[in-house]
Image (cartoon, rainbow, N blue to C red):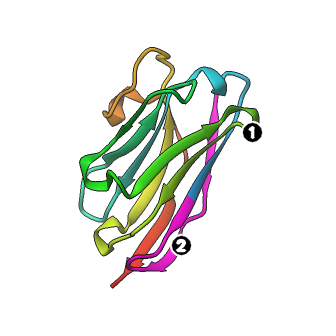
Amino acid sequence: QVQLVESGGGLVQSGGSLRLSCAASGRTFNSYPMGWFRQAPGKDREFVASISWDGRNRNVADGVKGRFTISRDNAKNTVYLQMNMLKPEDTAVYYCAADRNVVRLSRRPNDYDYWGQGTQVTVSS
């Protein structure tokens, strides 16, 4: 079992930056691919970025490529999402998630087994 807790959300002006953190409990965290997703009001949950268990491989959604970076520190059981050049359309609740399939680097929410409670990111224009 893995428990995930996100932090780092908040209110920021357009063009600003935030770094989200996702702290995981559980000894198996280091073997799980991790993902970040977001959900805006009235919209489906959408993929943002994912990272392999060892940090060597990453996927990033086209809409955030060049602005968002996913990373992880397995020694700290933490995955990060650095968000730069934020836009009002980035406003959403951001969730981290863990996938028990260690060979997969998925963009699909349904492939992830564990989820955090989410952290709100609001970007003002």
Q: Quadrant of the N terminus?
A: top right
Asked if the residues shown at circle 2 and circle 1 are in contact, with their CB atoms under 8 angstroms apart, the answer is no
Element type where label 1 sits in the image: helix
Q: Which residue is mark 2?
A: 10
Residue 81, x across and y down, in percent: 51, 51
From where the camera sits, is residue 118 visible?
Answer: no
Q: Is residue 61 magenta?
A: no
Residue 55, x across and y down, in percent: 55, 30
Q: Earlier in the sequence, mark 2 or mark 1?
A: 2
User: Relative to the observer, which residue lies in front, 77 or 41?
Assistant: 77
Residue ID at (44%, 14%): 103
Please tell me whether residue 77 is drawn above or below residue 1 in the rendered image. Answer: below
Residue 38 placement, left or right of 120: left
Structural distance between the alpha carbons of marks 2 and 1: 23 Å
Disc number placed over residue 88 in the picture, else none = none
Residue 118, x across and y down, in percent: 51, 55
Please tell me whether residue 62 is drawn above or below residue 43 in the rendered image. Answer: above
Residue ID at (32%, 75%): 88
Q: Which residue is mark 1?
A: 76
How busy is the neighbourhood of tag 1: few (under 14 within 10 Å), some, or many (20 plus)?
few
Image quadrant in which you'd find residue 93: bottom left
Residue ID at (44%, 65%): 84
Q: Quadrant of the C terminus?
A: bottom left
Q: Which residues are magenta?
A: 1-19
Residue ID at (57%, 48%): 80
Residue 115, x across and y down, in percent: 51, 40
Please tell me whether residue 117 is drawn above or below residue 51 in the rendered image. Answer: below
Please tell me whether residue 5 is drawn above or below residue 122 in the rendered image. Answer: above
- Residue type indicated by callout 2: Gly
Residue 71 placement, left or right of 109: right
Element type where label 2 sits in the image: strand
- Residue type indicated by callout 1: Lys
